[in-house]
Amino acid sequence: MTWFAWRQLRFPALIVLGFLVVMAVFFAITGPHLWSLYDGMKTCHAHGDCQSVKNSVLNGYTKSFPIVQTLSVAFPAILGVFWGAPLIAHELETGTYRLAWTQGVTRARWVFTKLVVVGGLSMLAVGLVSWMVTWWSSPVDTLNATRLSTTVFDSAYIAPIGYAAFGFALGVAAGVLWRRTVPAMATTMVAFAAVRLPFTHFLRPRLISPVTQNVSLKQAGNFGFERGPSGLSFVFGDPAQSSSLIVSDSVVGNNGGSVTQRWLSDNCHSLLNVGQATTPKGAPTGVRPTAFNDCIDKVVASFHQVVVFQPASRFWSLQWIELAIYVVAAALLGAFSYWWVRRRIT
């Protein structure tokens, strides 16, 4: 690392250090109280107040959780923008790299040292934040059984370390291509979001072949009818696998097809004349209960729910796979930056 690089990173490094200190202080103050509330779950059965203990844990920091998770999710992108993008772009833009190259520092050593040292610091910083968030939020994550939800998965455990490596390497690559700091920072921000969002919502649920489960509508229970501008339609709620990552959820006929308005017209005459909307698990006002129940029975007998999901037991497998993918992507971007500086910059 050259003196110019250290000077350039000094102020962002102080900001990151300050952020880490603030997070550590916050967790040190609030974490023990949160865990003490959670410890009450060990003895609540003897006192018959498990629900009140659970509510005290879940409601204790309801306003803090979204803020902490948002900061943790954004942290890798921020490091990529403010550490990765200017790291080489600033020296190329100002020409200070020429001084380093004339002082006996080879191009290979110059770029390799930057990639390894600052990239390692980025991963370490995000790893520390992720570790603190994991410890602090574990009681709530355990009670809610929502570790596979996007906000929890992306903000804690080991996957954010991969995001940090990728964000940093992406910023460096943008910097060597643009050779200007501001365009490189903007490109890093846009490209990071363009990769992370599709990966999270479309690729993650399919990293491992998902499980398909057929569920009886009688077992599911969360369904009913709703009247809209086009007529009466069948509606159903979320499946029961709250701790799983749902890929798709549909109601399918035992012999194919779906609950269409035509099917309702042929099988549920009494419901078609209802003027008010119905909700899942509910019958419309003014309809005899027997008419509603008869239609429900026909739906249950003819259709079933098909749920495609990643079970909660695959959480750590998905974490490790995603970490590996982003680290490999970071290594490829780093190799590209290394090659570009050695071969294309004069």
Image (cartoon, rainbow, N blue to C red):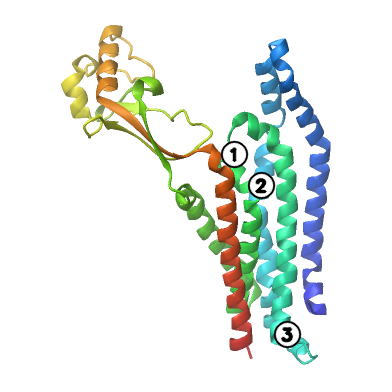
Position of residue 76 relative to residue 36, above or below, is: below
Question: Horizontal placement of 166 versus 125: left or right?
Answer: left
Looking at the picture, which amino acid does disc 3 mark? Answer: Tyr
User: Mark 1 near mark 2, Cβ–Cβ under 8 Å?
Assistant: yes
Q: Where does the image place residue 221, in percent across and percent down from the top left? A: 39, 20
* Sooner in the amino-acid sequence: mark 1 or mark 2: 1
- Which badge, 3 or 2, comes first in the chain's sequence? 3
Pointer 3 residue: 97
Q: Which residue is drawn at 26% across and 21% down?
A: 301
In the rendered image, the residue lying farthest to the left is 266
Secondary structure, mark 3, is: helix
Would you call the spot at circle 2 few (<14 residues within 10 Å), some (14-19), or many (20 or more)?
many
The answer to whether residue 5 shows anywhere in this view is yes
Q: Name the residue under label 1.
A: 147
Work out whether residue 18 or residue 290 is closer to the camera in this orientation and state it. Answer: 290
- Up-down: is 122 above or below 60? below
Instruction: Tell me the CA gap for discs 3 and 2.
Output: 38 Å
Which of the pair 162/264 is nearer the observer? Answer: 162
Circle 2 residue = 157
Residue 76, given in percent of the width and then of the height, sits at 66, 57
- N-term mark: 1 or 3: 3
Which of label 1 and label 3 is nearer to you?
1
- The amino acid type found where label 2 is placed reads Tyr
Within 10 angstroms of label 3, few (less than 14), some, or many (20 or more) residues? many
Q: Distance between the residues labelled 1 and 2?
A: 10 Å
Which class describes the residues within 10 Å of circle 1: few (<14), some (14-19), or many (20+)? many
Which image quarter: residue 41? top right
Give SS at disc 1: loop
